Amino acid sequence: MRLETVGLGKTFGDGVEALRGVSLSLVDGEFVSLVGPSGCGKSTLLAILAGLSEPSAGAVLIDGEPAGALLGRIGYMPQRDLLMQWRTTVENAAIGLELAGVTRREARERAQAQMARFGLTGFERKRPSALSGGMRQRAALLRTFLAGRDVLLLDEPFGSLDALTREAMREWLLGVWEADRKTILLVTHDVEEAVFLSDRVYVMSGRPGAVQAEVEIALPRPRALELTESAQFAELRARLLGPLRAQARAQLGVAWSAGGVGRMV
Amino acid sequence: MSAPRLALALGGRLEPRPRAALHSRAALARVAPPLLFGVLVVGVWWGYVAISGVSESVLPSPGQVARALVRDRSVLLSSGWTTLSEILIGYAIAAFVGVAIAAAVSSARVLERAVYPWLVATQMVPIPAIAPVVILWTGFDIRPRVIVIALVSFFPVVVNTIDGLRATDGELVGLLRTLGARRWELFRVARLPSALPYVFSGLRVAAAFAVIGAVVAEWAGASSGLGYLVLSYSSQTATSDVFAAVVVLAAIGVALFALVGVAERIAIPWWTLEE
């Protein structure tokens, strides 16, 4: 399944323009990231792709054809884990299968079978409040994976985690992804995360959100965390950071002199 | 990487968090203050009656009330049973109808917008005031009492349930829709469970209302029940016996309240155990 957007725009009822002319594409089995400052319309874009919001302009294409109703066709993991406190870990993970008509028992068995792979062994019957932040995110990811869609949209899945956990989760996510090669569109504001995980990275500018640059990440796979220390990695990170920093400064409305920038960096 | 190692690497706990053990000392610390306070209040009451020499028909001592409880036990028991059954039937109707109407009303936004303000407004209607009319409609049996009890208990249940259904996390609803949830499934999987804590807080308020409703309905016209007993004892200035009947009424209220608490713990452990 090839997912594309052509000139996607979104203006809200109150006149706020969140997206303008966003064109991007996802090829089968590709890992693509979308990096941009907060408030650049990344979440709005995901909501449109998930079918929860209608674009004001442009179109979404699937395999080159207008997509029609998107709701229920694309996997979506919102920023908050949204685990239901009244369900155990297994029950939360299995909800997508249950809603797809799989019997409750089979849905839970299939979720159970993935517990080890998602680092949730021993917590199957615990409620979300008993899980650590990382576990909650993995449970939410499992819920998204189990729903069985070909394309997954992940909205800052590791944003709320501490730095060390986040690193470990990245490596883990790559392992999971390499095993079943779903197409992933990951939204993040963390450049390192984008470079480490992706085949391709789109850089977005804010207000209204638009694609500012597209960077190919030609790093070998499989990747381990040590890769982040290589020169090639540093170079790619710098290429992405450049436009983002310029934007962040512009947003603050501060003009730094060259010397000032030198001291800042 | 194996799962346990992964869990460690990710800073997770390997063992589930142990539930806080209920220490007997902690339990004592929780139970002792209210118990002591109760004893103190009864003591002050008793002391006042003894010192002031107030007559039993004005303010009986706790001892006289206790003697009345024993003396009137058979009539208290039969009247108590009458009132209790009125309350249980009326309350059960209120609970079921309240939740059902709330679910129906909040199924369509237009309906909710049209009905909700009226539901809130009718909460201000002193339902006991219409008790005589209800009796006029239905006669002097148990029916008007059940209806009045159901009416007074109905409103807290329905309004709280609607509030709860409204409070469902909109993002969760969105997520479930991307997973293919339809209206009914959204209700069953997300809206109803997230409304349950509100439902139970409505039920707790309704429990207190139900007892008041029973008394007033019996006052409006009945020849049995604890409310009727209070009225007939006080016309004879048998004040200790009035107090005895009130004690039984209070006991029914407390028992109902406790029952709701138990039901809540069973129905929504994820809520009650984590507070």
Image (spheres, rainbow, N blue to C red):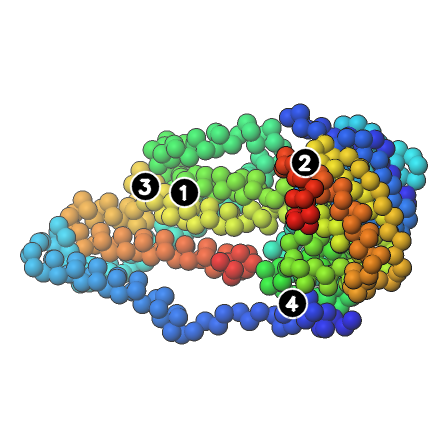
Confirm whether residue A39 shows in the render.
no
In the picture of the structure, the residue carrying the numbered disc 1 is B149
Confirm whether residue B268 shows in the render.
yes
Which amino acid type is shown beneath numbered disc 4?
Gly
- Whole-Å distance between the Cαs marked 3 and 4? 58 Å
Q: Earlier in the sequence, mark 3 or mark 1?
A: 1
Q: Residue at x 41, y 32 (%)?
A: B137
Q: Report which quarter residue A178 is drawn in.
A: bottom right
* Residue B237 position in % (x across, y down): 15, 48
Whether discs 4 and 1 lie on one chain: the answer is yes
Q: Residues within 10 Å of mark 3 (few under 14, many from 20)?
A: many
Residue contact between numbered discs 4 and 2, judged by CB atoms under 8 Å: no
| Secondary structure of residue under mark 1 | helix
Q: Residue at x 36, y 50 (%)?
A: B83
Whether discs 2 and 1 lie on one chain: the answer is no
- Whole-Å distance between the Cαs marked 4 and 1? 52 Å
- Whole-Å distance between the Cαs marked 3 and 1? 9 Å
Q: What label does residue B12 carry, if any?
A: 4
In the picture of the structure, the residue carrying the numbered disc 3 is B216
Q: Quadrant of the N terminus of chain B?
A: bottom right
